[in-house]
Amino acid sequence: MKVGFRKPSLKKSLNSRTTAKWKSQTKKAIIPSYGKKGTSWLKKQPIINFTIKSHLLFLIF
């Protein structure tokens, strides 16, 4: 377990900011529905899995 204060790294901070920005920009260029509201209907499988799982848990408990 670490003890003491957090040592912020300028290199890691800069890298995380620029990498996230570049990743989101490339995804927006490739995937037209990336980062827009109301596009969850495009990904049907996770929604179906979640509803089945929640119904099963409700029936069990």
Image (spheres, rainbow, N blue to C red):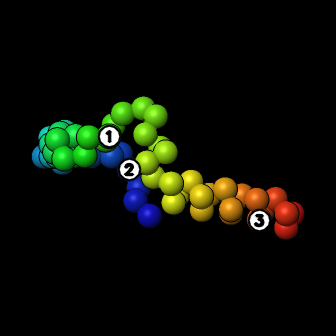
Secondary element under disc 1, as helix, strand or loop, is loop
Which residue is found at the position 43% from the left and 40% from the top?
Answer: 39
The mark that comes first in sequence, 3 or 1, is 1
Dot 3 and dot 2 residues touching (CB under 8 Å): no
The mark that comes first in sequence, 3 or 2, is 2
C-alpha separation, residue under disc 2 versus residue under disc 1: 44 Å
Front position among marks 3 and 1: 1
What amino acid type should be assigned to the residue bearing mark 3?
A: Leu
- Tell me where residue 5 appears, x and y as whole percent: 35, 45
What amino acid type should be assigned to the residue bearing mark 1?
A: Ser
Question: From the viewer's perspective, is residue 8 above or below residue 36?
Answer: below
The mark that comes first in sequence, 2 or 1, is 2
Residue hosting label 2: 4
Question: From the viewer's perspective, is residue 61 above or below residue 47?
Answer: below
Front position among marks 3 and 2: 3
- Tell me where residue 3 appears, x and y as whole percent: 41, 55
Instruction: Give the numbered dot on residue 56.
Output: 3
What amino acid type should be assigned to the residue bearing mark 2?
A: Gly
Question: From the viewer's perspective, is residue 47 above or below residue 56?
Answer: above
Q: Please state if 28 lies on the left or on the right of 1 as rendered.
A: left
Residue hosting label 1: 33
